[in-house]
């Protein structure tokens, strides 16, 4: 046989994750460990890729192989597909390499048809169970194949409940369910134009195709973009013989974590429901029982489960997230995977595993997702305001953190308003995978239904978003909800405490989080393994101090223009701009000098002797002038010039494309006195601060922006060097300084060997470099990038994640060329990408000395840099 596309569970193991997907590989591993796993086989991720390569078709070879494995499964189970006397029923489950919770669709009870159902009902003597399974199968199959969403079928169920005057789905009897199954099939026929397939083989291939297709559904695509999962990985399909948790009161289904995923505390943590199937526990249909209650109800099963959990943890050396089903008192394992956890839990579990001797510190550093750290650094409630507030209700503390925002009731509104920078809290009956984008933009999520493992809870924890779930007292009205005797409308402020489950009917101030001991321990290890330095982008002493607290080892980018917007300076900078002669301009700049020098002194102080790269003025000058006519009139008055004259200046500064206009080093080429003043401020500040701190060894780094040609760099550098040398000579101190440039124009990258003759360091300004390489601006790209994601032209935002193919090639080239001219050239990155883990890995590979990012991303960068160093050792 040419290529193997199908594996029985007993043929695989955990190391085959790329081929079998996470779910399939772990089912195989559990089978190998002798655990009670319903048997089945896995159609590989390569088969999925092949399906797309063949124009969305399952080709004959793969089809034949699947049929062979169906035969093997029939032999193994002693059951037969479509045999009314002894039917083989299976689940068809997706599973990709990376876990994508709730992102793909699963079909249960496949293999049922009228004949099977009749006979099966008789044989089991439990027609209710059989028809319940049947209607679920038709529902899931139709949903997945028709892609109409589950809502329609839920409506039919609700109508039925209403007709019968019952509340709970358990109160529907066999006949009701049989009737529902019929209604579902009719709906299928009317939508698809063909009868619901009764042939199990046809059902199976329909289901496998649907799973392959679901790899490309919008919510899967969105999740992949959020989590850097390439679209060419594909998903595997697992076909597994069914076990039934809905056979009656001695059957049930549940999910459990081997440790608490919110806090990291040791001990089993989970929920289950008796007489239920599949997703009932997490879908919030009935409120589940906690796993401790299983111990009381069925100690034998509980003990067996606990023993399996211990074995799995020992085996995987990580916290496990498991699914199980009890069929008439017998336990089956349906899934295990490394569990998602909150940032706080991630740090505690990693430290505990090291202390338990399960893993090394290196492994502990590698097992934490750097993006998660964000949640730890995020706000908590101000203790005093919290103490004064009275909760209006209490739900489950599903995902920790604090959120305060305006109420919205739909994910669309959450996304809309979140994008505008509004703080919103999403309030829902329960969430579904379709809500994912809105959940991402919400500050917090509140649901009326669902337990600690509900969709809302799992997704919110993964995102580090605060969530309170299962607050059953909420009643919904039209565009409003009531709780604690009050009614809240869209736009009203509420606050959620994801750590206690408390909900407040008012805004509560939030304050930055305090960083605990486990975090510190892991970060210390990370710093040991790291080879790249981590600096910060900071323009103020306040930001610099914040970044130092987070462990920054210097400033990679200090933008000087932000200082000019301060009310006490803007007048002087405007005076400089409207100056007509060099003398006027110098006079205005002289007013700015002491302020700018003071700024730099503050930053040097805050950075405690660590290196600071200061960039000369970058934006076009018109950014400093007013746009409103009222402000223009006022300014003319203040400046004592005529309105016409001021208008003339403003008109003369107008640019068609400011991004590519009169900015960066071009300003210093036209007005050398600006660069001279800034150099003076930098050097004098360094001399002053150095004098106060003899223990420091300050070496100012002066960075010339937007260079595309070595001669313009040489011209501006001469201004800098002449100014600096004169000041240093006069002061009599021995101060070293460096002059370097940003590489942010493609031409600079292409001619980096020449540029390096005059640049002692390069800092890759990958924001501009990305704009100029792609030819679209960051501020305008938002309008069309969504269409690009939709049409699969781009998988992610090139401004958030470095485009390694194109922009990265320029970076690599510039590194090589730069080193040819100046082997010891200092190399760093100061674009947004400096705080993005996958881009940091790239920086490590091409040999940069440091990354620089915003203060709140410094810990993320420290951890990501450590992981990059360990991965590239
Ligand atoms: P997801 O990835 O969304 O969790 P799963 O494939 O794990 O989807 O399945 C959904 C639900 O169906 C889970 O609760 C799972 O335990 C249950 N399930 C899957 N296969 C079987 C089976 N063969 N027998 C019984 N229950 C199953
Ligand atoms: Mg699911
Ligand atoms: Mg699952």
Image (cartoon, grey):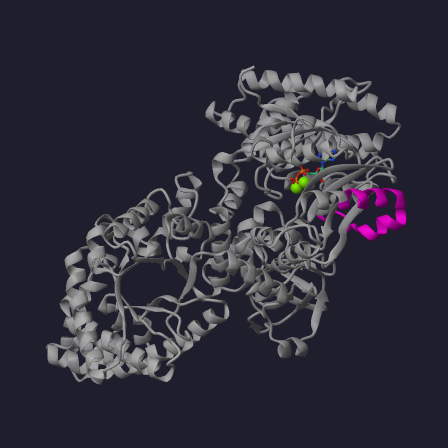
The secondary structure that dominates the magenta segment is helix
Residue 381, image x, y percentages: 61, 72
Residue 66, image x, y percentages: 62, 20
Count of numbered marks: 0
Query: Taking 217 as reference, is 709 left or right?
Result: left
Give whichever of 155, 474 is nearer the camera: 474
Give whichever of 255, 434 is nearer the camera: 255
Above or below, 353 relative to 217: below
Instruction: Inspect this view and state whether residue 165 appears.
Output: no
Residue 315, image x, y percentages: 70, 42
* Res 593 → quadrant: bottom left
- Membership of 727 in magenta stretch: no
- Membership of 294 in magenta stretch: yes
**x 39%, y 47%: residue:** 785
**x 56%, y 51%: residue:** 366
Instruction: Inspect this view and state whether residue 570 appears.
Output: yes
* Res 478 → quadrant: bottom right
Quadrant including the N terminus: top right
**x 56%, y 68%: residue:** 379
Above or below, 600 relative to 521: below
Query: Taking 414 as reference, is 748 left or right?
Result: left
Give whichever of 181, 540 is nearer the camera: 540
Ligand 1: which quarter?
top right
Give whichever of 339, 778 is nearer the camera: 339
Residue 71, image x, y percentages: 70, 17
The magenta segment is 283-310
């Amino acid at each position: 046989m040419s290529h193997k596309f199908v594996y029985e569970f007993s043929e695989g193991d955990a190391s085959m994750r790329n081929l079998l997907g996470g779910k399939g590989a772990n089912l195989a591993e559990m089978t190998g460990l002798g655990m009670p796993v319903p048997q089945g086989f896995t159609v590989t991720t390569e088969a999925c890729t092949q399906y797309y390569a063949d124009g969305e078709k399952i080709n004959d070879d793969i089809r034949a192989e699947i049929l062979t494995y169906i035969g093997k499964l029939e032999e193994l189970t002693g059951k037969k597909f479509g045999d009314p006397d002894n039917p083989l029923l299976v689940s068809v489950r997706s599973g990709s390499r990376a876990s994508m919770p709730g992102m793909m669709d699963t079909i249960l009870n496949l293999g049922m048809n009228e004949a099977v159902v009749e006979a099966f009902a008789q044989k089991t003597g439990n027609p209710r169970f059989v028809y319940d399974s049947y209607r679920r199968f038709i529902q899931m199959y139709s949903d997945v194949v028709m892609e109409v969403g589950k809502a329609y079928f839920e409506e039919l169920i609700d109508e039925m409940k209403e007709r019968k005057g019952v509340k709970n789905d358990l109160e529907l009897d066999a006949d009701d369910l049989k009737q529902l199954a019929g209604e579902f099939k009719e709906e299928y026929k009317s939508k698809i134009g063909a009868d619901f397939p009764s042939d199990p083989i046809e059902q199976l291939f329909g289901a496998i195709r649907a799973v392959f297709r679901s790899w490309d559904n919008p919510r899967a695509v969105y999740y992949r973009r959020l989590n850097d999962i390439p679209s060419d990985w594909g998903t595997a399909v697992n076909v597994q013989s069914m076990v039934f948790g809905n056979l009656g009161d001695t059957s049930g289904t549940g999910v459990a974590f081997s440790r608490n995923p919110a806090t990291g505390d040791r001990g089993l943590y989970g929920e289950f429901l008796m007489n239920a199937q599949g997703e009932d526990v997490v879908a919030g249909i009935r409120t589940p029982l906690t796993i401790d209650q299983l111990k009381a109800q069925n100690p034998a099963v509980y003990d067996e489960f606990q023993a399996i959990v211990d074995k799995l943890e020992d085996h995987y050396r990580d916290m496990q997230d498991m699914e199980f089903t009890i069929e008439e008192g017998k336990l089956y394992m349906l899934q295990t995977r490394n569990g998602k956890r909150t940032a706080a839990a991630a740090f505690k579990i990693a430290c505990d595993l090291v202390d338990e001797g399960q893993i090394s510190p290196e492994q502990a550093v590698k097992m934490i997702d750097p993006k998660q750290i964000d949640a730890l650094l995020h706000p908590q409630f101000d203790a005093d305001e919290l103490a004064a507030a009275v909760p209006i209700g209490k739900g489950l503390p599903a995902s920790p953190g604090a959120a305060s925002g305006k109420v919205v009731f739909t994910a669309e509104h959450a996304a809309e308003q979140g994008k505008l920078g509004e703080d919103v809290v999403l309030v829902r009956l329960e969430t579904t995978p379709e809500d994912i984008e809105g959940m991402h933009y919400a500050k917090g999520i509140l649901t009326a239904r669902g337990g600690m493992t509900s969709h809302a809870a799992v997704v919110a924890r993964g995102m580090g978003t605060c969530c309170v779930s299962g607050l059953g007292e909420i009643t919904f009205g039209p565009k409003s909800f009531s709780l604690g005797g009050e009614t809240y409308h869209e736009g009203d402020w509420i606050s959620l405490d994801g750590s206690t489950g408390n909900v407040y009917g008012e805004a509560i101030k939030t304050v930055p989080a305090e960083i605990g001991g486990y975090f510190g321990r892991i970060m210390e290890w990370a710093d040991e393994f790291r080879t790249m330095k981590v600096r910060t982008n900071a323009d103020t002493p306040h930001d610099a101090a914040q970044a130092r607290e987070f462990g920054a080892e210097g400033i990679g980018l200090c933008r000087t223009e932000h200082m000019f917007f301060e009310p006490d300076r803007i007048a002087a900078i405007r005076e400089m701009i409207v100056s007509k002669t060099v003398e006027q301009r110098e006079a205005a700049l002289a007013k700015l000098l002491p302020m700018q020098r003071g700024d730099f002194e503050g930053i040097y102080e805050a950075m405690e002797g660590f290196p600071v790269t200061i960039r000369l003025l970058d934006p076009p000058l018109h950014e400093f002038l007013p746009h409103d006519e009222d402000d223009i009139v006022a300014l003319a008055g203040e400046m004592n010039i005529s309105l016409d004259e001021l208008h003339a200046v403003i008109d003369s500064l107008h640019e068609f494309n400011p991004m590519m206009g009169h900015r960066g080093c071009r300003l210093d080429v036209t007005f050398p006195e600006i660069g001279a003043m800034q150099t003076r401020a930098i050097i004098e500040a360094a001399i002053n601060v150095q004098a106060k701190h003899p223990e420091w060894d300050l070496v100012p780094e002066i960075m010339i922006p937007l260079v595309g040609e070595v001669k313009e760099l040489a011209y501006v550098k001469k201004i800098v060097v002449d100014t600096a040398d004169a000041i240093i000579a006069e002061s009599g101190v021995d101060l070293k300084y460096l002059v370097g440039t940003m590489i942010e124009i493609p031409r600079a990258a292409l001619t980096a060997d020449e540029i390096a003759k005059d640049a002692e360091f390069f800092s890759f300004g990958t924001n501009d470099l990305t704009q100029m390489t792609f030819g679209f601006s960051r501020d305008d790209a938002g309008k069309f990038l969504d269409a690009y994601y939709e049409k699969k032209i781009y998988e992610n935002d090139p401004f958030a994640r470095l485009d390694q193919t194109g922009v990265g090639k320029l970076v690599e080239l510039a590194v090589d060329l730069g080193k040819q001219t100046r082997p010891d050239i200092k190399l760093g990155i100061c674009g947004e990408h400096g705080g993005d883990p996958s881009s940091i890995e790239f920086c490590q590979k091409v040999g940069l000395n440091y990354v620089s990012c915003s203060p709140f991303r410094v810990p993320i960068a420290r951890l990501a840099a450590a992981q990059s160093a360990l991965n590239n050792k």
